[in-house]
Image (tube, rainbow, N blue to C red):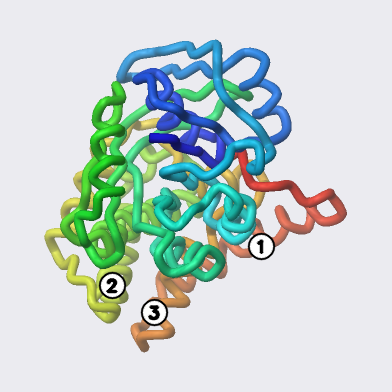
């Protein structure tokens, strides 16, 4: 099975690297310093599941040099999905499985608008990892897993093949979901709430989850997202909220969600695809989300300042996750 990984950041480099470790045929689509490091030094994974150094990595910034592949793991930021879809078009055939691993629930539809309705599956991943330097990823928490499936929940041959390949890789679990839309909302409930609350506190998870006031704020945010999900036909309920809180409490004390980390670092974040999506989807369904709306209003100046600083720079191609 030939696999392309678009994005050499904390997610793409980890899962792609583990696949390389297992002997899979993997090519990274990357750019800039990340591409240079992969070509020159290979990939280093520092992980609670076991470290590995991979001195020889297939990496390029030219999709035409790859040719059609069996699967594409799309690991760029959610706001890069449209550009990533156009980038990978030359390597997507009629049978290629395009698997987005972004935070949020809209990526499959965004991919389908460019690549066609049959290309994209639904997907998500569970991992706490970070690109700390070009070619160097640190996996800090969570048991790494990719949950995915066809959007109509068929057990197609292409998802079964990918599940088998993923489960042969060390430090990875591949899971075909019974209902992938439900699983995506389940992840969205957790990540949008934790990212939004974390971003307004500017402290790691361990500091704000033990503060009664911010823990109560989290529960309000979770409740709003649950009601939005229900309005869109996804039932999460008290069990889903309890599960999200339990997962939060298992995170390392120093964990910082990627959206929060980006906002703190003054770079463009997934605010629009997480907290912004809660507000947008709530409005579409007529569900009030006052707490999420407040979080969005509070964080928008940081996001807009990051974009303002980026103005005038040459637009980058997606590839660093």
Secondary structure under tag 1 reads helix
Q: Which mark is residue 301?
A: 1
Q: Which mark is residue 71?
A: none
Quadrant (top left, top right, bottom left, bottom right) of the N terminus: top left
Task: Name which of mark 2 and mark 1 comes first in the sequence.
Answer: 2
Q: SS of the residue at dot 2?
A: helix
Please give the name of the residue rendered at 54% of the width and 59% of the height, measured from the top-left corner.
271
- Residue at 12%, 59% (x, y): give it: 239
Mark 2 to mark 3 CA distance (whole Å): 9 Å
The foreground one among 259 and 297 is: 259
Which x, y percent locates residue 109? Answer: 45, 68
Q: Position of residue 277 (x, y in %)?
A: 46, 69
Disc ID at residue 229:
2
Q: Is residue 248 visible?
A: yes
Image quadrant where residue 122 sits: bottom left
Mark closer to the chain start, 2 or 3 = 2
| In the image: residue 32, left or right of residue 225 | right
**Residue 282 - label:** 3
Say if 142 sits above or below 96 in the image: above
Q: CA distance from mark 2 to mark 1?
A: 27 Å
Q: Nearer the viewer, residue 239 or 55?
A: 55
Q: Secondary structure at mark 3?
A: helix
Q: Are marks 2 and 1 in contact (CB under 8 Å)?
A: no
Between 12 and 212, the residue placed more toward the observer is 12
Mark 1 or mark 3: name the one nearer the start of the chain.
Answer: 3
Q: Where is residue 145? Give x, y as percent.
A: 29, 38
User: Quarter of the image containing the C terminus?
Assistant: top right
């Amino acid at each position: 099975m030939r696999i392309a990984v678009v994005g050499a950041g904390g997610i793409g480099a980890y899962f792609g690297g583990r696949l390389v470790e297992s002997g899979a045929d993997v090519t990274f689509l990357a750019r800039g310093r990340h591409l240079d490091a992969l070509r020159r030094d290979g990939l280093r994974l520092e992980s609670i599941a076991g470290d590995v150094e991979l001195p020889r990595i297939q990496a390029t910034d030219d999709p035409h040099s790859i040719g059609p592949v069996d699967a594409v793991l799309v690991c760029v930021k959610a706001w890069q999905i449209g550009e990533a879809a156009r980038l990978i078009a030359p390597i997507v055939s009629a049978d290629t499985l395009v698997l987005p691993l972004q935070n949020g629930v809209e990526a499959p539809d965004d991919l389908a608008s460019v690549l066609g309705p049959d290309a994209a599956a639904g997907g998500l991943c569970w991992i706490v990892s970070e690109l700390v330097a070009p070619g160097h990823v640190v996996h800090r928490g969570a048991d790494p897993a990719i949950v995915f499936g066809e959007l109509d929940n068929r057990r197609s041959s292409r998802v079964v093949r990918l599940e088998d390949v993923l489960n042969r890789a060390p430090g990875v679990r591949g899971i075909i979901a019974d209902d992938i839309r439900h699983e995506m909302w389940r992840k969205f409930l957790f990540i949008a709430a934790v990212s939004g609350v974390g971003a307004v506190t500017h402290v790691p998870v361990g500091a704000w989850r033990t503060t009664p006031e911010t823990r109560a704020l989290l529960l309000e945010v979770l409740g709003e997202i649950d009601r939005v999900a229900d309005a869109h036909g996804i039932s999460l309920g008290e069990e889903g909220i309890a599960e999200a809180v339990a997962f939060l409490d298992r995170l390392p004390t120093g964990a910082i969600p990627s959206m929060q980390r980006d906002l703190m670092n003054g770079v463009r974040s997934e605010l629009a695809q997480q907290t912004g999506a809660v507000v947008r989807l709530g409005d579409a369904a007529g569900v009030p989300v006052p707490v999420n709306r407040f979080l969005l209003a509070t964080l928008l100046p940081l996001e807009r300042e990051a974009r303002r600083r980026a103005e005038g720079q040459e637009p980058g191609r997606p590839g660093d996750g």
